[in-house]
Image (tube, rainbow, N blue to C red):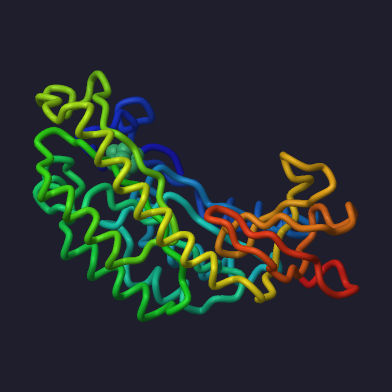
Amino acid sequence: MYGCDKFCTYCIVPYTRGKERSRRPEEIIQEVRRLASEGYKEITLLGQNVNAYGKDFEDMNYGLGDLMDELRKIDIPRIRFTTSHPRDFDDHLIEVLAKGGNLLDHIHLPVQSGSSEVLKLMARKYDRERYMELVKKIKAAMPNASLTTDIIVGFPNETDEQFEETLSLYREVEFDSAYTFIYSPREGTPAAKMKDNVPMRVKKERLQRLNALVNEISAKKMKEYEGKVVEVLVEGESKNNPEVLAGYTEKSKLVNFKGPKEAIGKIVRVKIQQAKTWSLDGEMVGEAIEVK
Ligand code: SF4
């Protein structure tokens, strides 16, 4: 799908990409079937706000949950979607994702701030409580789901206490990782008319503290993989070392491992020997290259 109707005050996308427009489900299902038959292993359903999928259909009541429910029946190993907006993440989608199979349980759920006041200024259309309720529902339905997020620090008027609320929310959810940003105004957005009144020094300090927490929790979660066997979709040679292959787990963790070049483009099992903050090192196990 294309476009976004959310109009978060800091974001230029609704002005540049226009209104939400969804591709017809039959067209997507047919395309995924074709890709599966051609041997593709992973599909990502993309949209600026992919949870709003189908809201623009006038002739039927059909959402992302319905589409995922059909796609999970297709013989393709992995289906992802991004990016979610918490406001449009409905119970039906959670129910369908909980069925598992080829629907991966890695959910990127941008929160942007842990403070309800800041979220209001951002016009995110949910508050801290509602976001936490959604996280609880997702975790109850999918106890092993990994959650990642996006966070902006130093939004206009953000106080120290409000920033602390972002840290406490991060700790409470225990995200696997996050993309973190310093706020900077985008010309033509409502937020650009607000006074950008958090000094750059303070913004940088906040980003540093947030990143320290992101790294701490990510390192802890990565450590849990040591000694475990994961399934990796092999993308190619590692950027830093052509002797090593690199690929991603179902939960989007980068894995570097020694294995034959024939493994590229396939899903293989890798035993994790060492966890780093942002990647895992391991060794391919078993004779069979393809497990799916
Ligand atoms: S931040 Fe995302 S949801 Fe908000 S207006 Fe931009 S694209 Fe839409």
- Can residue 59 be seen at all in this image of the molecule? no
- Nearest to the observer: residue 185 or residue 276: 276
Q: Is residue 190 above or below residue 61?
A: above
The residue sitting at 73% across, 64% down in the picture is 282
Q: Quadrant of residue 254?
A: bottom right
- Nearest to the observer: residue 95 or residue 134: 134
Residue 256, given in percent of the width and then of the height, sits at 71, 55
* Left-right relation of 157 to 143: left
The residue sitting at 43% across, 54% down in the picture is 215
Residue 110, given in percent of the width and then of the height, sits at 34, 51
The residue sitting at 63% across, 59% down in the picture is 280
Residue 135, given in percent of the width and then of the height, sits at 31, 68
Q: Quadrant of residue 18?
A: top left
User: Looking at the image, in which quadrant does ligand 1 appear?
Assistant: top left
Q: How many marks on residues?
A: 0
* Left-right relation of 240 to 5: right
* Left-right relation of 24 to 57: right
Residue positioned most to the top: 187
The quadrant in which the C terminus is found is: bottom right
Q: Is residue 150 above or below residue 259?
A: above
* Left-right relation of 161 to 141: left
- Nearest to the observer: residue 250 or residue 219: 219
The residue sitting at 34% across, 37% down in the picture is 181
- Can residue 138 be seen at all in this image of the molecule? yes
Residue 164, given in percent of the width and then of the height, sits at 17, 53
